[in-house]
Image (cartoon, rainbow, N blue to C red):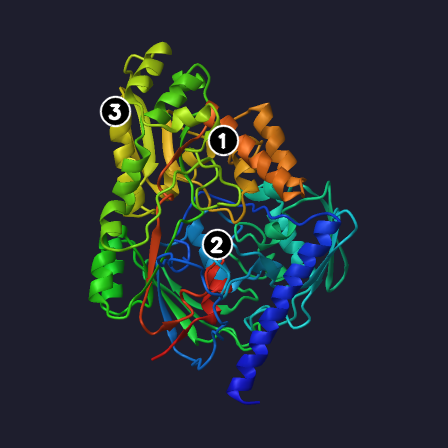
Amino acid sequence: MTSSDYWQRYWRARASRRRFLGGAAAATAGAAGLALVGCGGEEEAPSPTPAPASPTPAGPTPTPTPVDPFANAKRGGIWNGQSTGDPPTIDPYGNLSFLTKSFAAYVYSRLFMYEAGPGIAYGENRPVPDLAESAEPNADGSEWVIKLKPNAKFHNVAPVNGRAVTTEDVKFSWGRMTAETTPNRSQVAFVDRVEFPDATTVKFTLKRPNAAFLDVLADANLFWIMPKEADGGFNPAEKAIGSGPWILKSYQASVAFTFERNPNWHFEGFPLMDGVQLSIIPEYATRLAQFLAGNSDAAGIDANDLVQVRDQVRGVQLSGVIPQLLSFIYFDPKPNTYWRDPRFRRAVSMALDRDAITDIGYNVKKLRDAGFDVGAPWNNIIPAGMTRWWLDPKSPDMGEGRAYFEYNVAEAKKLLEAVGYKGEPIKYQYTNNRYGSTFNNIAEVTQAYLTQAGINAQTEVQDYSSVYITQTFVGNFDGIAFGYETPFPEGGAYLIRFFTEDPLNHGKVNDPRLREIALKQQATVDEEERRALFHEAQKINGVEMYYVPNQAGAGTTWTAYQPWVRNGVEYVTIGYGGATEVLPFYWKDI
């Protein structure tokens, strides 16, 4: 077989997988419905792999001719990537950090993943099989039978030694997913039982039909398939053996991860590159310098540096998206505090000039003047980048809550006076050693806006690993906090996280109306009815302001690729699965 024949065969296979997804959606839409809901684990937000940003042409948009992304593809080479820090552990069931989940996508597989490729815009990704070969629902969608791929094997590393993936491994991994020590277990509470009829068949029985079932299996926050040998045969906090595209060769803390290509990955012929060198570089300035020097193949770029990168790196490929990323202010759950009164929470929201905050974080005006296509919508309790479910806070459809998103210092001061607040010191806390300069700048200016409105906000900058993610994020704190929410791949998980008995309900919010909506949307298979539920939840929170949406995550986020990278801007995904969903399909034209 010639090289050209191989790529053509693969491209046809990808089209077939896309047809599988369409067929599954059609079958279940007529029976149980297959809408999409994500479930997730934490609050972290690495830069998503963005879609290309380009001006909107005048007149009708022509239909592009499909292009084979592997035409003239060159095998080999090492991907030189960047990581912002060391994960607390490399065991994906061992903690909530985005650094751990991003690492997991190199090594481990899921039953499903999110499809990426030419023509699939950021945010339009839908689940397709990873370890699964097929997924068949019954008539009402309350039961799903999943068959494993016959060619799926673990890495050829002792003590697993390249054996086939079986349902014994799925069973072991499901046990870890649902263990009492796993904070994300509430995200799969809709599953009644899981059975394993044979070595290649898994049967899920749900308590009720779930519009998000395949998204749950694809969500890189949740269900990673580990070999059963991880139960005593090796320590997954120290050694990673999976069936994913990359084999871990070494990890030197604060220096780098090194991976090599898995030659037996169940997507035949991929990855295209021989390995990955993932350098751990906490300082943004150093990451930027490494990219400018040509030592990194890609990098997240701060909006303030975008013009420099465009002008300095000849042929650089820049792309930007409004990410599906939410930042928010939340309040400790203790009784007898000022913020138990919704007027205080509304005052906090009205103290924020969201347009100015977005400009500070994302350099909106200067970049537009420089010719960049830059968006600046407002986050709701659903992030602005998740347009499928998002309700624009500026829209009349927001009802009463629309007024509480508007910048109005005078009204904010009146509300504070009405609740009896007289300037007592209130702790204002966030972490600044993981999220980058955009988040840090917005965190700082938020404190200034609160102060301007008369709130005596005393800043406490917390260490991410030892304090913020282990205490503040889980609702164990005093005062007011600011942070990111997990970039869930689908919107329903935001409502489950914020408004149910989820262990990571940050403010321990207990509103029966919102809890009912959060649970009802899971079982609502009609998309328009489900969208109405999402909008109703956003309207209720807009009035109550249990969580005050902020603007980190609501501006255009940029990634730069070196001129020699191929498929970087064509393959885009959501969440933490990029090392599986896009990186194996990159190649370097050097």
Asked if the residues shown at circle 1 and circle 2 are in contact, with their CB atoms under 8 angstroms apart, the answer is: no
Report the disc number at residue 384: none
Report the amino acid beneath label 1: Asp
Residue bearing the label numbered 3: 451
Report the disc number at residue 397: 1
Q: Position of residue 287 (x, y in %)?
A: 27, 59
Cα distance, mark 1 to mark 2?
28 Å
Q: Nearer the viewer, residue 71 or 236?
A: 71
Q: Position of residue 324 (x, y in %)?
A: 45, 47
Q: Residue at x 32, y 14 (%)?
A: 414
Which of the two discs, 1 and 2, labels the residue nearer the N terminus?
1
Q: Quadrant of residue 160?
A: bottom right
Report the amino acid beneath label 2: Ile
Disc 2: CA contacts within 10 A as few (<14), some (14-19) or many (>=20): many
Q: Nearer the viewer, residue 505 or 474?
A: 505
Q: Secondary structure at mark 3?
A: helix
Cα distance, mark 1 to mark 3?
31 Å
User: How many numbered callouts?
Assistant: 3
Cα distance, mark 3 to mark 2?
36 Å
